[in-house]
Image (spheres, rainbow, N blue to C red):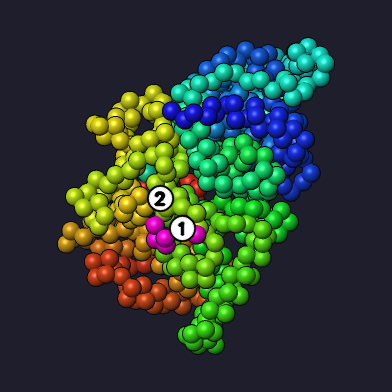
Amino acid sequence: MIEQNFVELYEKSFTKYWDSPAITDYPGDNSYTYGELAEKIAWVHSLFGEAGLKRGDKVALVGKNHSSWSIVFLSAISYGAVIVPILHEFNAESIEHIVEHSESKITFVGESLWTRLNPSKFKLPVFSLPSFEPLQGVGEPLRFIDRVNAAFKKKYASGFGKGDVKYAEVSNDTVVCLNYTSGTTGFSKGVMLTANNYAGNVTTAHNLDLLFEYERLLAFLPMAHAYGCAFDFLYALSTGVHVFILGVPPTPQNLLKGFQEIKPHLIISVPLIFEKIYKKKILPTIHKPAMKILLGIPGVNALIYKKIRKSLIESLGGSFREVIIGGAALGKEVESFYAKIKFPFTVGYGMTECAPLISYDHHYDFEPTSCGSILDIMEARIDSPDPENVPGEIQVRGENVMKEYFKNEEATKAAFTDDGWLKTGDSGILRGRRLFIKGRIKTMILSSTGQNIYPEEIEAKLNNLPYVAESVVVQRRNFIAALVFPDFPAVEEDGISREKLGEIMQDNKAQLNKSLAHYERIASIELHDTEFEKTPKKSVKRFLYA
């Protein structure tokens, strides 16, 4: 059990950094200091009381990243309730099912999202974000808010101060979050995360000195997902960091503008962002004929790489110590280039069931193609006769591992080995404590000669070829095929006809197959006119295309 009590972290942080900025919605000027954040949480506690919420009850939270989202999350766990963050990108049917399945007593939902949902599916009190106004289930909305305000004023008759930041006693073995996964192979499951799971992640980040008090962070990952929740949000606010919450789509254009204006001290990202930067900004430069010649000259190439690194760092604000990439595999070609130019990045590994971190190395210790070293509070093993060389399933146990799946005994039993290790479903090798991942076991393709084929590795190469926006490698009856969604803006800009595009894809296939083992080679490329459907962390839902 982690010694540091999870909920007490925020009692200490809110009082210590009382007058410092805590959260700002970006773009915009809506902002809270740590003291103002604590006061708003106390007001939401009054709302909970008037709504009849009891300790241990579930609070469903559905909405885009926003300060009001973070307030509800912190209010629930500090009240002694269980928060149920639901990704707003889930379809309406899934959201309604999760609210019902989780047995949530209260729901908070984004105003724009509410119009897509069926109100009859929500028989419990529902409140709007970001306004906190009642949508249904409490009688007359204005009278309810008046009752909440009166209860708050009665409790804090002399005004709300540092001494009033006193939260429910929640032991670290208590379940504080029910996080429904966004898996690529089927319907989501409710992961029961304890205060200890989160304390393990947060205290690990503290010990690693990922951030320091009064620094800045741009939070753009979905906070309803374990990765963004733990590090962009929970860890940052336990450290006295000023968190800017991105309220517009995380397109490269919006992110680069945000990085330039906020100048964050740490960047926490998924691979897609930096793969796009590589493909759209870097590849066109280094593939110019003259540049290829210069990059072949020793000494000159080092100067060019230094210039590229400097430009990239400046475009990201220039103040960050490192970029942490996680949530999915980073393409090997992209990773190799960033390592070659000595860009300060690292790749970590985790899963929702571990809230989420399993392995990490600082950028100066990071070994390319790995995903860091197993955390000190975790253990890992490989289900393989030769764990250092022959890939097998990665299995873990330790402080970060979930309690179980909510109301799903069968899935829980399937998730653990008989001796209590969590089965990650990922294949990899372990050298010392450093982890190397090959791919998802469920997506692995077995060739006709018995060789293991990892489609993610092939896709990473294919996605960097001309006019390929994204791809999915699948197994047909007796051959391997690649489904490709073309980069249509580039196709249109260059005046490429459909017939010509087909010829280019045949050239891409030939070039790709030269870089693959014989048993990995693809037999065909099939064009898709629409983007592949993805999870909120931007992994393709492969089961739709198998």
The main secondary structure of the magenta stretch is loop
Sequence order check: which comes first, mark 2 or mark 1?
1
Quarter holding residue 395: top left
Q: Is residue 201 left or right of residue 34?
A: left
Report how far apart the C-alphas of labels 2 and 1 lie in the structure. Answer: 9 Å
Q: Where is residue 312 drawn, in percent x and y?
A: 61, 67
Instruction: Judge whether residue 330 can be spotted in this image.
Output: yes
- Determine if the magenta segment contains residue 477: no
Residue drawn at 53 percent across, 38 percent down: 202
Marks 2 and 1 in Cβ contact (< 8 Å): yes
Per the image, label 2 sits on a secondary structure element best described as: strand
Task: Name the quarter where the N terminus is drawn.
Answer: top left
Per the image, label 1 sits on a secondary structure element best described as: loop
- Kind of residue sitting beneath label 2: Ser
- Kind of residue sitting beneath label 1: Asp
| Front residue of this view, candidates 506 and 262 | 262
| Front residue of this view, candidates 444 and 137 | 444
On residue 365, which mark appears?
1
**Residue indicated by mark 2:** 373
Question: Would you place residue 416 above or below residue 255 in this image?
Answer: above
| Front residue of this view, candidates 158 and 2 | 2
**Magenta region:** 364-370
Q: Is residue 89 left or right of residue 36?
A: left
Question: Would you place residue 361 above or below residue 45 in this image?
Answer: below
